[in-house]
Amino acid sequence: MATLKKYNLAGEETGSLQVDDVLLEVKAHPQSVKDYLVAIRNNARQWSASTKTRAEINRTGRKPHPQKGGGRSRQGDLAAPQYKGGGIVFGPRPKFDIHVRINKKERRAAIATLIAEKLRADRVHVLQKEHMKEPRTKKLAAFFDKMQLGSSRILVLGEAHPVKKEGKKKKEARPPHHNLIKSLRNIPKKEYMLLPQMNGYALARCQDLVILESALDQFLSVLGGSSNE
């Protein structure tokens, strides 16, 4: 049974909770996890790089010199690739229909597997809910230093905030941890992400996870359970 420790912003341990071993037994095939991560990176590409072929170069079609009598090799026009400013051979072209479909069950299994690995390695920490009246980067930097996570890449996960409906338009409410989010901006290798936006690439890229206490139940529901204090 894994133990999650709770800390306050001062870096002091304030409690702990237990995670059932059943939740940690989730396991996806390594190839399935790899395919999922590769698909995320491929889908993030714009595929908009483009070069012009000789047919698209705006130049005269006249031959640069007579074909015979000059002792030189025959040339067609100045849009040929051997001339400066000519067309590009086998250059990048915009691609379409390059989206890689990710199976829902495979995606969920891969995310759960990556989370379970971090739990087993004691790489998940819970930050006790504390109200920050204003952004304080130094306070958060001191917290990471106290936890010996100052040089590590950290992913901070928070709960999703509600959406207010005003007439036909949907207006997003102010994030409940906006001061914490602002405090993280200037700390290198530290990133804040909402739980619904969590993906396998962000999990694989970070070394440690810091879960806000208010988002703990949502976080454990990804593994199919809830907190058991």
Image (cartoon, rainbow, N blue to C red):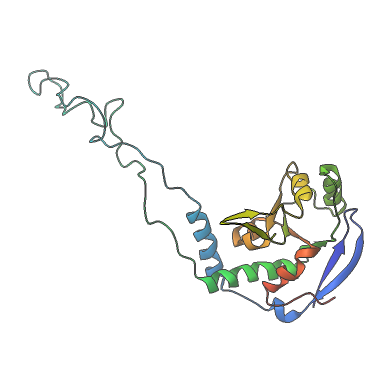
Tell me what residue is drawn at x 92 percent, y 64 percent.
14
* Residue 151 in view, yes or no: no
- Which image quarter is the C terminus in? bottom right
Tell me what residue is drawn at x 82 percent, y 51 percent.
144
State left or right for residue 176 relative to residue 65: right
Q: Position of residue 161 (x, y in %)?
A: 70, 59
State left or right for residue 134 relative to residue 200: right
Q: Position of residue 189 (x, y in %)?
A: 71, 47
Q: Residue 159 occupies which quadrant of the picture?
A: bottom right
State left or right for residue 227 relative to residue 113: right
Of residue 214 and residue 82, the one placed in the foreground of this image is 214
- In the image, residue 177 sits, relative to residue 53, either above or below, namely below
Q: Residue 197 occupies which quadrant of the picture?
A: bottom right
Q: Position of residue 117 (x, y in %)?
A: 69, 69
- In the image, residue 68 sits, relative to residue 156, either above or below, namely above
- Which image quarter is the N terminus in? bottom right
Tell me what residue is drawn at x 53 percent, y 64 percent.
36
State left or right for residue 43 relative to residue 205: left
The image shows a total of numbered marks equal to 0
Residue at the top extreme, as displayed: 70
Of residue 216 and residue 85, the one placed in the foreground of this image is 216
Of residue 148 and residue 135, the one placed in the foreground of this image is 135
* Residue 54 in view, yes or no: yes
Residue at the bottom extreme, as displayed: 22
